[in-house]
Amino acid sequence: MYTQLDIETHFDGKLKIAYLNQPESLNALTKPSLADLKDFIKSCNEDDTVRCVAISGRGRAFCSGQNLDDAFVQGNEHHDNDIIRKIVVDYYNPLVTEITHCRKPVIALVNGPAVGAGAMLALICDFVLANDKSYFAQAFSNIGLIPDTGGTYFLPKLLGRQLANYLAFTGKKLYAEEAKSYGLVAEVFAEEEFNSKSMEILERLSNMPTAAIKLTKKAFAHSYNNTLKEQLELEGDLQQEAAETEDFIEGVNAFLQKRKPNYKGK
């Protein structure tokens, strides 16, 4: 089904992991790989069996950013001076939308360098788990471009204006521990235990009340533009919606019965 991705399924279908699978190019992004990723996220979003989604890379890199040969060689062949805008609008923007609007938690497993669009691919996920040898670089400025893949939207919100400007202007590498100190990474694990530690977190997410996570994501997304009054009203509405789920009833019953809850994601 996917020519550019290697898909793993765990925990009876509750977890799906998509690995960018072009290690020879450090998983550089092409139009086919961007289309595959978008379709993968869309499929997971629509599949009620899936409770958690993750993105990672095969080989020694997470993602080295846009494959320039894929962009420019084809652009020259067709004498298309508008090729970059078309790639952004037709391939990157739909992927960003699918990830940020996904009803399931989408986790980036950063196993190595994450550069340019590859860094932003990780940072637009709900959170990032990284190994201690990985790094992030907003390398767009190195070739005279601006941050895309949601970069101009998310970086100032994640970092504040000063740090967003600094990293975007300079393209400085941030190794995982430093990125964590800036709030870009949730957890950093030693390289040798990265897979096992990450899988523990993914297993936990795969068994959480997925409907509540979906509503939490929705509330956080609206907080960027809402006033406090509007956000408090939204919290009331979404909390009521959460209280009407089967998972809420199960959570309350499990608490009262002093047992572990068995959530169904409904």
Image (spheres, rainbow, N blue to C red):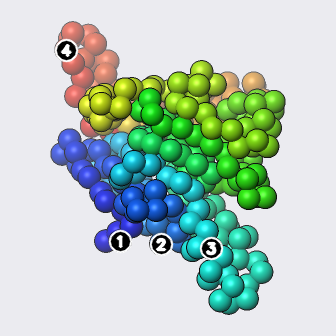
Q: CA distance from mark 1 to mark 4?
A: 44 Å
Query: Amino acid type of disc 3?
Result: Ala
Q: Which residue is mark 2?
A: 32
Q: Give how far apart the Cα atoms at labels 1 and 2 are.
A: 8 Å
Q: Amino acid at mark 1?
A: Thr
Q: Residue at x 80, y 38 (%)?
A: 165
On screen, residue 20 above or below 164: below
Q: Amino acid at mark 2?
A: Pro
Q: Which residue is mark 4?
A: 259
Local secondary structure at mark 2 = helix
Q: Gap between marks 3 and 4, in whole Å?
A: 55 Å
Q: Position of residue 33 (x, y in %)?
A: 46, 66
Q: In this rendering, would 6 be left or right of 37?
A: left
The quadrant where residue 213 appears: top left
Q: Marks 2 and 1: in contact by CB < 8 Å?
A: yes
* Residue at point 62%, 83% (across, down): 74
Of the residues tagged 3 and 2, which is closer to the observer?
3
Q: Which residue is mark 1?
A: 3
Which residue is under mark 3?
Answer: 71
Mark 3: give few (<14), some (14-19) or many (20+) Cα within 10 Å.
some
Whether label 3 touches label 4, CB < 8 Å = no
The residue positioned 76% from the left and 78% from the top of the image is 82
Q: Earlier in the sequence, mark 3 or mark 1?
A: 1
Is label 4 in a helix, a strand or a loop?
Answer: loop
Q: Is residue 142 above or below residue 112?
A: below
